[in-house]
Amino acid sequence: MNLIEEIARLHPDDAPAVHDGRRLVTYGELFAGAKPVADAIRDAAAPLGRRPRVGLHCPNGLDYIMLAMGILLADACLVPLAEELTAEERDEITRTTALDLILQHGGSSPPTPAAGGTPPWHLELLTCLPAVASAKEGHFEPAFPEDEFQALNPAFIRFSSGTTGTSKGVVLSHESLLARITAANEGMRIGPEDRILWMLPMAHHFAVSIVLYLHAGALTLLESSPTREDVLACAERHEATVIYGSPFHFAQLAADRGDFDWPSLRLAVATAAKLPEATGRAFHQRFGTPLVQGLGIIEVGLSVLNLDAALKKPGSLGKPLPAYTVELRDPDGRTVADGTPGEFHVRGPGLLDAYLVPWNPNPLQNGFFASGDLVMRDADGHLTLVGRLKSVINVAGMKVFPEEVEAVLNLHPAVKASRVLGRDHPQMGQIPVAEIIPADPEAPPKPAALQRYCREHISAYKVPLRYGVVDEIPLTASGKVRRH
């Protein structure tokens, strides 16, 4: 099964697919652009006698969609090479995945439509390079069994954002991608009548989000400008019905003081990081639409969505979508009682097929994926993200979740952003320490004032004992606080 071929069969050629701010591209034009890319990959990879692994280095935009579709249409395995990667990081992915080819966006502009017709995209937009030429090394011998990898019908390899631990490389097949987007859409209910405003980096979200929109027959709106005025102008101009972004994006939009109230908006989904309750309330107050939080995990997809309590419980992840079963377990594998944090385990369609390095074709435990997220369930069945298992700070035998402390610090008017970490201590085991970006760099808050503020809102053992002023908080590519 090839997912892109499935999408091609679902929609008429003249149905609108993507608007990039300059032109409307139909589904027929998307496939007309993807086909020569697929043909070029097949020709370049023919000597291999197997599905190639193809790295894609391309900025956000219509070109990314067409090139990614071309890779998948060629039955090749797509490996995103995000723009923010350093040369060293890019070469490491090239070696780890044993890439065969790299598609490099050429940086030229799309062709101008000719009078009386719209030409397809051209191959000038990419350079098809042998991967070894990029890394300047000899032939890559994969550190995984090639035959087992090929047997999966692999479509996609994605490295997690690496907030904790080592990223392993998640392998997804065409079948798993289809099952995943089908299950997620039971909650979002996206269809041909929807117009989705795109806000996220495609290198991190294409294989689920964009593919879901294409499979559902929706129109994806691409706004290249990150300013909220331009984003809202795009939403108004095209009557956007859905927006899927990070809490950062929604905080920016909620701060708008214009008069556009977005009457067409039916669904706003926040993912990629924990949603601050203040952001959820501010967005609803500004636009009148609840901000729905979801739990998206690269190994799983979107399995939890706050569809029924976004106003009452804006900080909740919601409930599992119909296709998924969730269990919260303690370190011994026993399910925990409501109100007690436990590690999030999930079972359902579209879970990862394998970890690439070290090779693990059986990453599930009795069908469940253990996420490393600490989650708590309330009496109504709603789930709340508490923190990461590996980020927990142990203070004299008591657990401190840095995300909880950061949420408090970030509400202080003199704090723009914060990061809380554990530091070894000879008597306490660990102590929490905080880094802050001051709202006013010329007048940073005093540590004593921050300590007093924290003590008013959280237990004493959770209060950071040290505070440092920094210029920036290191983040992963998907916007999460980096903790190592």
Image (cartoon, rainbow, N blue to C red):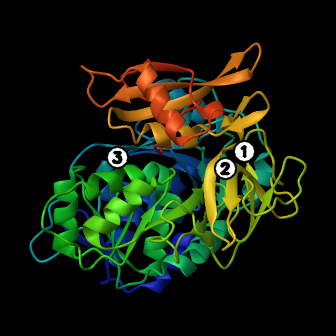
Residue named by callout 3:
59
What's the residue type where badge 3 is placed?
Answer: Pro
Q: Circle 1 is placed at which residue position?
A: 356
| Residue 479, percent from left and from top | 46, 43
- Secondary element at tag 2: strand
Q: Residue furthest left?
A: 115
Crowding around mark 2 (Cα neighbors within 10 Å: few <14, some 14 to 19, many 20+) is: many
Q: Name the residue rendered at 66%, 79% in the picture.
A: 322
Residue 324 position in % (x across, y down): 70, 72
In the displayed structure, does residue 126 sit left or right of residue 406? left
Q: Quadrant of the N terminus?
A: bottom right
Q: Position of residue 58 (x, y in %)?
A: 38, 46
Q: Position of residue 287 (x, y in %)?
A: 27, 69
Quadrant containing the C terminus is top right
Which residue is found at the position 36% from the left and 22% from the top?
471
Which sits in the foreground, 196 or 31? Answer: 196
Badge 2 vs badge 1, beta-carbon distance below 8 Å = yes
Residue flagged by tag 2: what amino acid is it? Val
Residue 14 occupies quadrant: bottom left
The residue at the point 64 percent across, 64 percent down is 383
